[in-house]
Amino acid sequence: MVRLGHVMVGVSNIQRSLAFYRDVMDLDVTLEQPGFAFLNAGGGVDLVLSEAHGALYPLVGSMELSFSVSDIMVAFTELRKRGVNFMTEPRLVTATQWAANFTDPDGHLLSVVGPKL
């Protein structure tokens, strides 16, 4: 059986991106090495920030990371307090799920997705 173990994202500045995902997105750092940082993204998946990938491949436009939240409005409000500038207000994307989009420091598209309680 194949399972997703990690998602590697190319970044231009490891420390800037690490601060964003650790301090703003509240992900726990599990390992740091020169040019790489591993963060626990939940569900057994690691988010890996890689300066090497950032040097080899285009940084922006090839993916979107969606973070599951238990209440879209609580997450939206908290992330705005932490300095996230959302591209969209929370909007209904399925019968029960709402989403709001924003970007990380390199312009990667991110979203929070969850119910509106």
Image: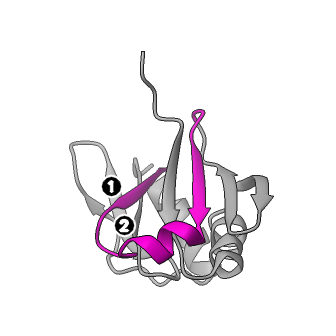
Vertical placement of 2 versus 75: above or below? above
Q: Is residue 46 above or below residue 53?
A: above
Residue picked out by circle 1 = 98
Q: Can residue 72 be seen by looking at this rendering?
A: yes
Q: Which residue appears at 49% of the width and 74% of the height?
A: 54
How far across and down, in percent of the image, does residue 4 sit?
46, 34
Q: Secondary structure at mark 1?
A: strand
Q: Say what secondary structure mark 2 lies in.
A: strand
Q: For this view, does 34 lie left or right of residue 81?
A: right
Question: How crowded is the residue under tag 2: few (<14 C-alpha within 10 Å), some, or many (20+)?
Answer: many
Query: Seen in the image, is 17 located left or right of residue 116?
Result: right
Residue 42 figure quarter: top right
- Name which residue lies at 27% across and 64% down: 91
The stretch in magenta equals 43-69
Above or below for 68 versus 79: above
Q: In the picture provided, is 56 more to the left or to the right than 47?
A: left
Is residue 63 located in the magenta-colored stretch of the structure?
A: yes
Q: Closer to the camera, 21 or 30?
A: 30
Residue drawn at point x = 48 percent, y = 81 percent: 106
Asked if the residue at tag 2 contacts the one at tag 1, i.e. Cβ–Cβ closer than 8 Å, the answer is: yes
Q: Which residue is mark 2?
A: 100
- Nearest the viewer among 92 and 30 is 30
63 versus 78 height, above or below? above
Q: Could you tell me which quadrant the N terminus lies in? A: top left
- Type of amino acid at the residue the image marks with label 2: Ala
Check the image and name the residue furthest to the front.
56
Label 1 and label 2: CA atoms lie apart by: 7 Å
32 relative position to 49: left or right: right
* Relative image position of residue 92 (x, y in whole percent): 25, 57
Res. 70 visible in picture = no
Which amino acid does the dot numbered 1 rest on?
Trp
